[in-house]
Image (cartoon, rainbow, N blue to C red):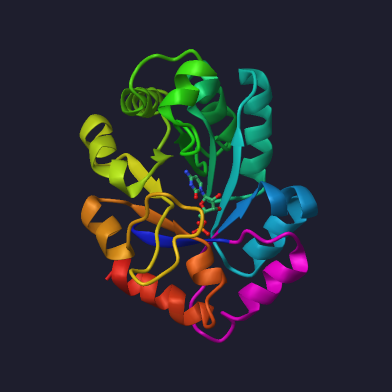
Amino acid sequence: MGKDVIVACDYPDRETTLNFLDRFEGSGVKPFVKIGMELFYAEGPDIVREIKARGHRIFLDLKLHDIPNTVKKAMAVLSRLDVDMCNLHAAGTKRMMEAAIEGLTRPDGTRPVLLAVTQLTSTDQEALENDLLIHEPIKDVVMKYALNAKESGLDGVVCSPLEAGEVHGVCGNGFLTVTPGVRFAEGDAGDQKRVTTPERARELGSDYIVMGRPVTAAADPVAAYMRAMADFVG
Ligand code: C5P
C-alpha cells in the first residue's frame, strides 16, 4: 500500500452511500473508502460486501476496545469480511493489540492493515488529567501508545498530519500514519480544529489522508477527489 486518499463515507444509510459512489462510475477511479460506525451499525456487514464488490478498498473504522479474547474473535470476523484496513484503541493494552493481530491473521498468513487510535483528538490535556487520571503531557501519551502499537505488531496509527513526523521519528518511517483533519486551502474547516491541506500533509509525511466533507459535500465530488489525489499523491 502506498500514499493514497481515503474518502470518509459518513452517511446514514446504504442508499445515500451508493448514490455518492455512483458519481464515480465511469470516471475510471475507485476511491479507497472509509466506513464508520454510523453506516456499519445501520446496514451491517452487507454494506461492506457490497462496496467491496464494486471494487473499492475499505477502511472499516470501528475502533474496537474490549478484552483481548473478544477483540480477537471480532477481528477474525472483520478479516473474513475482507476489509483492507481496520482499527482499535491502543488504550486496550498491548495484550489486546496482540490478540487483535492473531484474530485478524488469516490461515494463509495475510491480514488487513491494522491501525491504532492513540488518544482521540477530542480528548484534551484537561480531560486526560481530570477524567482519565493520566498526568503525562498528551503528546507523550500519544507517542507511547504509538510505540505500544508498533511493538504489538500493528501497522500504524490514526493521527493528525501535524503528529505524523514525530510518530515516524519514534516508530520508524515504515509505520503508517493515516491522517484526518485535511482541508483544501479555501475550504471550510467545519468542526475540525487544526486542519492541514493535502500538499502540507504530504510534506509532513502522512501516508494516507482521510477526507470526508471536502469530497462528499463538494458540488463535484469526483473533481474534489482528483484534486486531493493530485495534491497528495502527485
Ligand atoms: O469530514 P471530515 O473530512 O472532517 O471527516 C474526517 C473523518 O475522519 C471523519 O470520519 C471523522 O470521524 C474521522 N476522524 C477525524 N479525526 C480523528 C479521527 C477520525 O476526523 N481524530
Q: Is residue 22 left or right of residue 220?
A: right
Q: Quadrant of residue 145?
A: top left
The N terminus lies in quadrant: bottom left
Give the total of numbered labels: 0
Q: Quadrant of residue 10?
A: bottom right
Residue at 56% across / 65% down in the picture?
A: 56
Q: Is residue 152 above or below residue 38?
A: above
Q: Is residue 224 left or right of residue 10?
A: left
Q: Quadrant of residue 3?
A: bottom left
Residue at 37% across / 55% down in the picture?
A: 195
Residue 162 image point, x, y percent: 29, 46
Residue 122 can be seen, yes or no: yes
Q: Nearer the viewer, residue 55 or 210?
A: 210
Residue 233 can be seen, yes or no: no
Residue 59 image point, x, y percent: 54, 52
Q: Is residue 39 above or below residue 109?
A: below
- Which residue reaches farthest bottom? 26
Residue 212 image point, x, y percent: 52, 62
| Residue 94 within the segment the image draws in magenta | no
Residues drawn in magenta: 9-33
Residue at 71% across / 63% down in the picture?
A: 50
Q: Is residue 110 above or below residue 29?
A: above
Q: Nearer the viewer, residue 150 or 183?
A: 183
The C terminus lies in quadrant: bottom left
| Residue 20 within the segment the image draws in magenta | yes
Residue 60 image point, x, y percent: 59, 48
